[in-house]
Image (cartoon, rainbow, N blue to C red):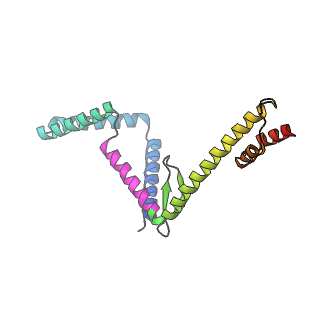
């Protein structure tokens, strides 16, 4: 049995239980529910009266732990175990569905990136770092261009040919064009 078949069985079982509960609620009216609750309370009261000291201690410990968890806003131990089991099942299902040893890699924020091998992951991070550097360079150049556009012709200083070629090499063509116009 594969993990997906097991998951489907669990899902079907939960759906059937929900339907059964809905039907039960729909078929039972108010007075009968009240009578049922009263019956349950009486049964529990009788079981407490007839309980031995050990059974009473067990009940006290359970209620004390439950109250402590509620005070500390902790999830019950059983629910924590269920969450861990669910996470393990999901990891196993993801690993079983992955092909050629590829796994789903997740970024820090938990969003699925893609199926990648280790080599692809390394190249991805290198490419991403390169793209970020290019974006930073482009943003600084845009900011410099904006500052040059806002300056007047009087603010631009005259320069010789060597500095103009240096400007072109630095991709500051706007300053170079303005300074060359001033030289002519």
**Residue interval drawn in magenta:** 74-94
Specify whether 183 is left or right of 7: right
User: Of residues 75 and 99, which is closer to you in this image?
Assistant: 99
Question: Which quarter shows the N terminus?
Answer: bottom left
Where is 127 relative to 76, above or below?
A: below
Residue at horizontal 36%, vertical 51%? Answer: 84
Residue 149, horizontal then vertical, whole percent: 78, 35
| Residue 78 is one of the magenta-drawn residues | yes
User: Of residues 12 and 47, which is closer to you in this image?
Assistant: 12
Residue 43, horizontal then vertical, whole percent: 24, 38
Is residue 83 in view? yes
The answer to which image quadrant residue 92 occupies is: bottom left
Specify whether 107 is left or right of 149: left
Where is 112 relative to 62, above or below?
A: below
The answer to which image quadrant residue 126 occupies is: bottom right
Residue at horizontal 47%, vertical 53%? Answer: 15
């Amino acid at each position: 049995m594969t993990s997906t078949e097991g998951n489907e069985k669990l899902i079907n079982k939960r759906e059937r239980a929900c339907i059964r509960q809905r039907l039960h609620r729909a078929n039972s009216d108010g007075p009968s529910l009240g009578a049922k609750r009263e019956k349950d309370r009486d049964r529990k009261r009788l079981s407490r009266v007839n309980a031995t000291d050990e059974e009473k201690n067990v009940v006290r410990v359970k209620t004390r732990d439950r109250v402590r968890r509620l005070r500390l806003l902790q999830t019950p131990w059983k629910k924590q175990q269920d969450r861990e089991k669910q996470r393990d099942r999901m990891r196993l299902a993801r690993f079983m569905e992955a092909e050629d040893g590829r796994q789903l890699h997740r970024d820090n924020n938990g969003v699925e990136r893609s199926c990648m091998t280790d080599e692809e992951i390394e190249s991805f991070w290198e490419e991403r770092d390169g793209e970020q550097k290019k974006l930073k360079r482009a943003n600084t150049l845009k900011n410099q261009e904006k500052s040059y556009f806002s300056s007047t012709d009087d603010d631009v200083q005259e320069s010789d040919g060597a500095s103009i070629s240096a400007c072109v090499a630095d991709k500051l063509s706007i300053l170079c064009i303005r300074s060359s116009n001033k030289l002519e």
